Image (tube, rainbow, N blue to C red):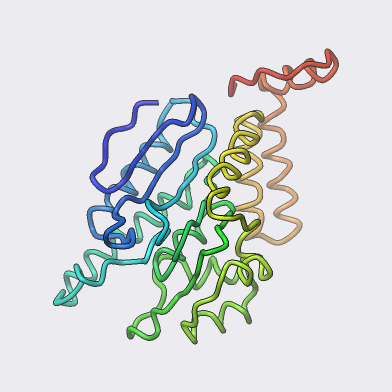
Amino acid sequence: MNFEQFETLLVESIDERLLSVTLNRPKAANAFNTQMVRDLYQLFEQISLASEPVRCIILTGAGTRAFCAGADLKERKGMDDAAWTRQHLEIERMARAIKDCPIPIIGAVNGAAFGGGCEIACLLDFLYASDTARFALPETGLGIIPGAGGTQTLPRAVGARRAKEIILSGQPFGAAEALEWGLVNKVFAAQELLPATTRAAQKIAANAPVAVKQAKQAVDRGGQMSLADGLAFEIEAYHRTVPTQDRREGVLAFNEKRTPKFEGR
């Protein structure tokens, strides 16, 4: 997998199927400035169009202090309304590129995920967190509201009433609460977070890529439909897997009592 180098991201192949993406501004608590926003949407747009065999992505932050502290408010100091709006258009593009990525993305939240950092986490397919992770959407205390999807993605994870409490108060909460409320799937000691996330990513990457993509799409899009429409969409996604070589290989491997070798076709 040959992805370009980015100023604010570390992009590394764990193996030929797994990609690790690290938000890499540790001195700024991995807060995203305009350059990181551009790096993120360029990377995820590139991944979406690539023919490279990426099957799962891990997204984390550099260091132990933070996953991502949100937008870099030092860069925003003194921005006039027009400049703020121009930058936010790029943030919106970043959020769409992450959310629309057809490849599963697991978040490894290794520290503070505040503001836009919490919103990035909410855009991912699911989250593992260290026991030191903390989350917050403090935007109302800055005179704005979450603007990278937070008012839409957080309620879908924790329910509308809980999301209103979090967003309207801006109060931080910890990994244990995030687990209890359904925002994160599992919590690990800090040193175990990346190994555990990698094991989960490897399990996903070992499954049939076409089936994984179709299942992800069925969950994401079906969840925005009525039950009847969602069921119809699921059947359409199911039938896209039927003519694949991977479907034939999966059944054959099961009957031959061996591990299937999926090729994504």
Is 188 displayed left or right of 13 in the figure? right
> Residue 83: x percent and y percent?
17, 69
> Residue 230: x percent and y percent?
70, 53
Quadrant of the frame with the N terminus? top left
Seen from the viewer's position, the closer of residues 223 and 147 is 147
> Residue 193: x percent and y percent?
56, 50
Residue in the image at 66% along x and 32% along y: 240
Is 213 displayed left or right of 115 in the figure? right
Q: Quadrant of residue 196?
A: top right
Seen from the viewer's position, the closer of residues 121 and 172 is 172
Residue in the image at 50% along x and 32% along y: 18
Residue in the image at 71% along x and 33% along y: 239
Farthest residue to the right: give it.
Answer: 255
Residue in the image at 31% along x and 66% along y: 71
Quadrant of the frame with the C terminus? top right
> Residue 170: x percent and y percent?
46, 82
Seen from the viewer's position, the closer of residues 241 and 98 is 98
Is 142 displayed left or right of 119 in the figure? left
Q: How many marks?
A: 0
